[in-house]
Amino acid sequence: MISSVLVANRGEIACRVFRTCRELGIATVAVHSDPDAGALHVREADAAVRLPGATPAETYLRGELIVKAALAAGADAVHPGYGFLSENAEFAQAVTDAGLVWIGPSAEAIEAMASKTRAKELMGLATLDPGSLTESDLPVLVKAAAGGGGRGMRVVRSLVELAGELEAARSEAASAFGDGEVFVEPYIEAGRHVEVQILADAHGTVWALGTRDCSLQRRHQKVVEESPAPGLGPELVDTLHTLAVGAARAVDYRGAGTVEFLVAEDGRAHFLEMNTRLQVEHPVTEAVFGLDLVALQLSIAQGEALPPSPPQERGHAVEARLYAEDPSAGWTPQAGVLHALDVPGVPPAVRVDAGYAAGDVIGVHYDPMLAKIIAWAPTRAEAIRRLAYSLRRARVHGPVTNRDLLVASLEHPDFVGGRLDTGFYERNLDELTAPAPGEEHAAVAAAIADAAGRSGRFGGAWRNLPSTDQVKAYGDHEIRYRPLRDGGFEVVDRPGVRVVRATAHRVALEVDGVVRNYDVGVHGDTVHVDSPAGAHALTPRPRFTDPQDRAEPGSLLAPMPGTVVRVGDGVVEGARVTQGQPLVWLEAMKMEHRIVSPASGTLTALHAVPGRQVEVGALLAVVNEVVNEAQEAPAS
């Protein structure tokens, strides 16, 4: 019997495994990097072991250190979570060689399926030869052979881009998974990403647990997932189940795994890969089948048998991944203090799997996912409505997140209507990231809350009132108000808006006869205003502009904190560069981000050095734009 489990991972998945272990009476052990010393998964574990260093390569990808940690802490089993070493056959073998129980498939099964190239060979499929590609083969997809989560993946639509994208994919894959192997396959436009959860024991039983649709993706990483996948006919579902079970039996699979497919517009299913681990989106399957997949993983690892068939699925579940990122700025990851994370909803109808809590620091070394919010209901429409409601009313204070995008996605007619494909965000991103309505009234609430906080509270003393209107500005909104003798406030320049009640943290406004409450939280220079209509993060506008805030024209500033991983070939001070030319590559939160030249001209300064840590806004380089040379030429 397993008595103590070490989770070779971090964040949300480590917390999720610990939750099941606690329910089963199993002790828990965490491992952590130096930046994660105070992380939520460390706080929730019974014991923790330090992995010296900060980057994944120094810590969570060091299998030998994790095995030593398990032995030192007295664990008798290791759960790999997902990502990092979860699909590393050498690590799985090292765990079993150390006399520990590996909670997952055998090293042989991982070896057969964890590499996408070898998995395709096993399924009788071939990859493309990069050296033989022609324009007629495009578009193609460059993919990492190991791992997942969109790392090491690039869509190539021009042959001139191929070499650079292959190099970038290799670098990113090596950083994320310790394996730089990549391959090329055809890219199917407007396909649906559909997968089948499998569960197999050592006694010959293999379950196929419904279907999941994971088509809403950015950067080839899933954002919204649901089960069952809507709109699939029973014949196609049977085909997917048969292929998934066949893949598991082909490698004598044990434990939880996922077989992924791309379903084309014509309804044909194309095998993508088999993930030999638990998936991020496993909660939607748990919700519709009433199962705990982690508990079943532990049971199978102890040699126990599954029932002959799984329970019947019921209802519908939808999951949204809450990321610290800015979708309107190229999905740029965000870092900083998470001041509040509170999602309303009643379990089991709404479930929150979080890797962070209020007060935690979101760093730059790891994936920016903060939490997963899962809603279940008897029907798909009800599940979508519950999830959108919970997200809209969530208090998420701190760095910019994709919360508003998630709400807009769930309410988009194409999603509601089940018209799904992987190009959803490419087509709809501008619409989905448009500013949310209601910011003007949120700014009014922020200004009145600020005034109430400075004057005491609504209904306080009225003496020494200012003789002129007071002004508070947030972005484009300038709010004029005046204190009243009864302790209240009057909004001067917005007819139809009346302050009903006000404190430093909550303001009730009547707008055209309708009263709504606004909750106000101030964290440093940012004011967060939450209401039933949505959330807004506002920055007070200073009365005077600081000349120091102005950057030199042509300056390339770091859009996020991260590490400079490389500088383009020939990129040195004095070099001529062209508009759009990649100059610097930053790595942040396990993804590489290219910094390109804003114009054609001369590189007059270069401060980016490989290996250097930079903060957001740091000056990386300066490009002096070249004006039309013909205009500069002297007259003849």
Image: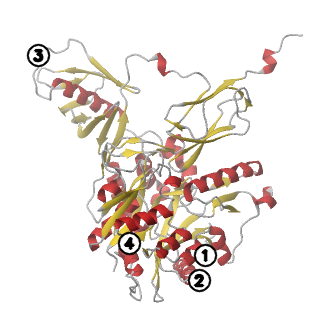
Answer whether labels 2 and 1 touch (C-beta < 8 Å).
yes
Q: Is residue 71 visible?
A: yes
Give the mark toward the camera: 1 or 4. 1
Q: Which of 201 and 208 is in front in this view?
A: 201
| Residue 294, label in figure | 4
Circle 2: element type:
helix
* Looking at the image, residue 22 lies above or below residue 408: below
| Residue at numbered disc 2 | 250
Which amino acid type corresponds to the residue marked 4 in the rendered image?
Val
Q: Where does label 3 land, which residue? A: 463
- Is the residue under label 4 in contact with that under label 1 (CB below 8 Å)? no
Q: Number of numbered discs present?
A: 4
Residue 271: which numbered mark, if any? none
Tell me whether circle 2 and circle 3 mark residues in contact (CB < 8 Å).
no
In the foreground, 200 or 138: 200
Which amino acid type is marked by label 2? Ala
Considering only order in the chain, which callout, 1 or 3, is on the residue closer to the N terminus? 1
Location of the C terminus (image quadrant): top right
Q: Measuring from the top left, give residue 417's x and y in whole percent.
A: 47, 61
First-in-chain label (2 vs 3)? 2
Question: Of circles 2 and 1, which is in front?
Answer: 1
